[in-house]
Image (spheres, helix red, strand yellow):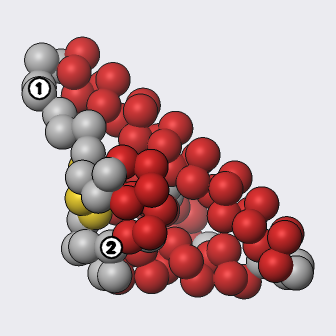
Amino acid sequence: MAAWSDKHYGGKMKFEEGPDGQYAETFARRIARKKGNGKTMQINLQEELVRVVGRQTARLLNERAKGSTADKFWISKGDLLGQEPDITAFQTKPWQEL
């Protein structure tokens, strides 16, 4: 993560819990679980990083629409891993009875 940040953002990018933190490690493990050789892994990484930047962009637009000044060099847990699943559907009475 740190090498990618240095290459594309001049080392300015900051990660929630750091580039070697729990969320970055989980992100890397998700990519490593995908099967493939070196070239395929590189493509998988590039695709995942495009998703991260897309989620970050959506978050920044959302925050700025609310009038907040968001740091464009901040990568959050949600940016790296996606949003946490909505569990409200599982909190209904019929689901609880199962």
Q: Dot 2, crowdedness within 10 Å: few (<14), some or many (≥20)? A: some
Residue 25 shows in the view: yes
Q: Which residue is mark 1?
A: 68
Q: Above or below — where is 16 with respect to 69? A: below
Residue 76 shows in the view: no
Considering the numbered disc 2 on the image, is that residue within a helix, a strand or a loop?
A: loop
* Residue at image point 33% right, 73% down: 19
Give percent across and percent down for residue 32: 68, 82
Give percent across and percent down for residue 11: 29, 58
Residue type, mark 2 in image: Pro
* Residue at image point 26% right, 45% down: 73
Identify the disc placed on residue 19: 2
What residue occupies the far left of the structure in this picture? 68
* Residue at image point 77% right, 60% down: 43
Q: Quadrant of the N terminus?
A: bottom left
Tell me: 49 left or right of 73: right
Q: Dot 1, crowdedness within 10 Å: few (<14), some or many (≥20)? A: few
Residue type, mark 1 in image: Ser
Q: Above or below — where is 65 with respect to 76? A: above
Give percent across and percent down for residue 26: 48, 79
Q: Quadrant of the C terminus?
A: bottom right
